[in-house]
Image (cartoon, rainbow, N blue to C red):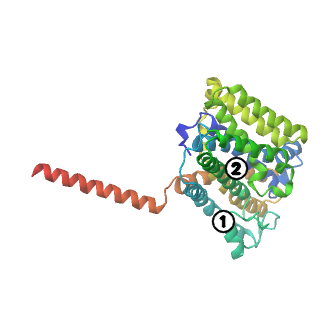
Amino acid sequence: MRSPDQRLPGLDALKGLACALIIWHHLAFYGPMSDVLYPFVPELTDWLYEYGRMAVQVFLVVGGFLAASSLAPRGVASFGRAGGLIFRRYRRLVRPYLVALLASVLVTALVRPWFHDDSLSAAPGLWQVLAHVLMLQDVFDLEALSAGVWYVAIDLQLFALSVLIFSLAGWLGRRWRGMPAQLGVWLVGVLAALSLLVFNLQEGLDMTGLYFFGAYALGMLAFWSGSMPRQWLWWGGMALLGSAALLLDFRERLLLALLVAFGLVWLRQSAGARQGLRLRWLTQLGQMSYSVFLIHFPVCLLVNAVVSYFWPTQLLANTLGLFAAFFLSLLAGRMLYLWVELRPPARQLRASAAHDFSGQQHGQGRSQGKSA
């Protein structure tokens, strides 16, 4: 993926908003602190409980937008080996993911003896741990060790699907010369229609990328609408796909995905909209949103456990606990982002060090040769 300063300004701000909403959704959904607060703000708690999770649609659409910009900015694959690209994506996702999973398991084990809540998972077995490492826990119907890990698996599946679609399009184009140059875009459109009109209506498929590909593809189409000629055709295709799916079965999450997709189109064309989203703190939250998303559950779980143990019914303590859980989640996410997500693997560091050393040796050799 592109570095933050190369992205469309405003994308990280959107991700930051969605990230904050997801944390508050989980604070309303999990743990006793929100139960204490509920009688005083029932409408707000109900709204966060019911609609906060829909912020995931922002991540899906933005993810598709960024995937199109890196995989096929002109509708044709701009990468080489599909397998290596998918593995690099997995490696990028899995490092902070495993650290956050370990934190969740440790916090759960720490509070289990004195904190009893439905949000606690059972002690994991070897098969459950392996399934999480491979991001297959939902496929095998295993209990999740942390909230939100399902989305990481879906993100990897959606990226892999996109890579494979454009790899297939390239193979077909080489095999049959009559194929259109942008065959991959047409294949994305076909799979998007199947997802929106068929797969997304089957709840049993919600552990697969096929269920979510429609929203992801709307983000891809939003990107291509700004980098291809005849923009109105792309906008019409997005509107037609979304309208047909909503007429078939109205889904609020799909309506939000469609609005976000057109919002990205507007954001790309409106300097005023981009300027309005240049809030530094929100942009920074968006840049580290993946790490915050991963680590916030064990942080919220720990705060819930401590507050409910010492102040189980006090309104002020539980209110402050909710805000403490939110801000501590941001702090923990910042640490995970800086220390794990941004830090290159040890092998890459060694390779870089070896390169620098050889460069220094080469430079010294040239200097000695000149002096001689």
> Which numbered disc covers residue 326?
2
348 lies left or right of 372: right
Q: Is residue 337 visible?
A: yes
Task: Give above or below for 200 relative to 90.
Answer: above
356 lies left or right of 122: left
In the image, 135 versus 18, the foreground residue is: 135
Name the kind of residue labelled 2 in the image.
Phe
Mark pair 1, 2: CA separation = 29 Å
In the image, 62 versus 35, the foreground residue is: 62
| Mark with earlier residue (1, 2) | 1
- In the rendered image, which quarter is residue 362 located in? bottom left
Q: Which residue is mark 1?
A: 134
336 lies left or right of 104: left
Secondary structure category for the residue under label 1: loop
At 79% across and 62% down in the image, what residue appears?
119
Binning the other alpha carbons within 10 Å of mark 2 as few (below 14), some (14 to 19) or many (20 upward) gives some
Secondary structure category for the residue under label 2: helix
